[in-house]
Amino acid sequence: MNVVNIAAYRFVALDDLSALRERVRERAETLALKGTVLLAHEGINLFLAGTRAATDAFMAWLREDARFAALEAKQSLSDTVPFGRLRVRLKREIITLRLPALRPAEGRAPGVDATTLKRWLDQGRDDAGREVVMLDTRNDYETDAGAFAQAVDYRIARFTDFPGALAADRARYAGKTVVPYCTGGIRCEKAAIYMQELGIEHVHQLEGGILKYLELTDGAHWQGGCFVFDGRGAVGADLLPLPQEAGA
């Protein structure tokens, strides 16, 4: 497999969106990359595919901008490019929640890395002895592809439904450590901040989301595939594309 798929995001204040859009588009086109880059005043979110040399060169170029110096990409492989074209778009939010007072660039909830989370799930408790509750912040069709074992799933149709579902169920998390998770980390970063503001005390977002967990662990406690927003449909615990049903 010689196609590298990268996913990355960063919440950081951006005020030159139009000019940045053109620079990003030009660089990605020069490197023959395909996929989607979203830009908003709150940051950047990207899903791109191409050769390893091209994806590495793009990330190195992007990190030359001090605002993106800490940008980390999740990687997976495929035989073909799972995007039909390149799109660089300006958005109100790089992940839509419609809570403008929530500003991830100004501070975030504590994170838990993949290997630490696996250890917590192996032992059934976090290092403080609290029960760990996994909370899926994705949409219902994503969770249908796969999820962490025994995770809370609100069966939401869109991320904007998450605050209402959580507020009605907040008592569930009293005295427990809750780990909101999502595909690559961006959605659960906003979710974790909202949970803290709601008064839920022990919240740790999964750093890098499901993709980083599968990359850095043996995939224990994960069941099924991980839905991805491209032509692959879903990837397995080995981050390789899952066979798609005939006619899908």
Image (cartoon, rainbow, N blue to C red):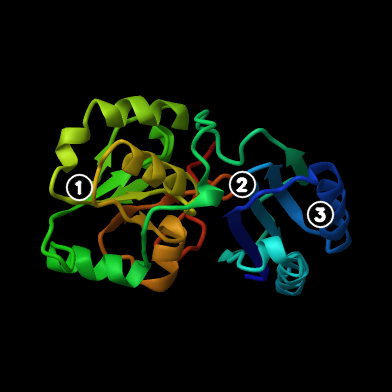
Residue 174 visible: yes
User: Residue 167 versus residue 6: which sits nearer the camera?
Assistant: 167
Task: Please state which amino acid type lies under the numbered disc 2.
Answer: Gly
Q: Are discs 1 and 3 less than 8 Å apart at CB?
A: no
- Residue 24, label in figure: 3
Residue located 49% across and 54% down the image? 184
Q: Decide if residue 15 is on the left or right side of residue 77.
A: right
Residue 145 visible: no
User: Residue 162 versus residue 194: which sits nearer the camera?
Assistant: 194
Question: Label 1: which residue?
Answer: 150
State the image coordinates of residue 65 (x, y, percent, origin top left): 75, 65
Give the class, few, some or many, for how many residues have Cα within 10 Å of label 2's Cα (few <14, many ≥20): few
Label 3 residue SS: helix
The nearer-to-camera label among 1 and 3 is 3
Question: Label 2: which residue?
Answer: 231
User: Residue 111 versus residue 209: which sits nearer the camera?
Assistant: 111
Give the class, few, some or many, for how many residues have Cα within 10 Å of label 3's Cα (few <14, many ≥20): some
Q: Decide if residue 207 is on the left or right side of residue 148.
A: right
Residue located 56% across and 39% down the image? 95
C-alpha gap between disc 1 and disc 3: 40 Å
| On screen, residue 74 above or below 193 | below
Task: Please state which amino acid type lies under the numbered disc 1.
Answer: Gln
Task: Please state which amino acid type lies under the numbered disc 3.
Answer: Val
Q: Earlier in the sequence, mark 1 or mark 3?
A: 3
C-alpha gap between disc 3 and disc 2: 22 Å
User: Residue 130 versus residue 247: which sits nearer the camera?
Assistant: 130
The nearer-to-camera label among 2 and 1 is 1
Q: Earlier in the sequence, mark 3 or mark 2?
A: 3
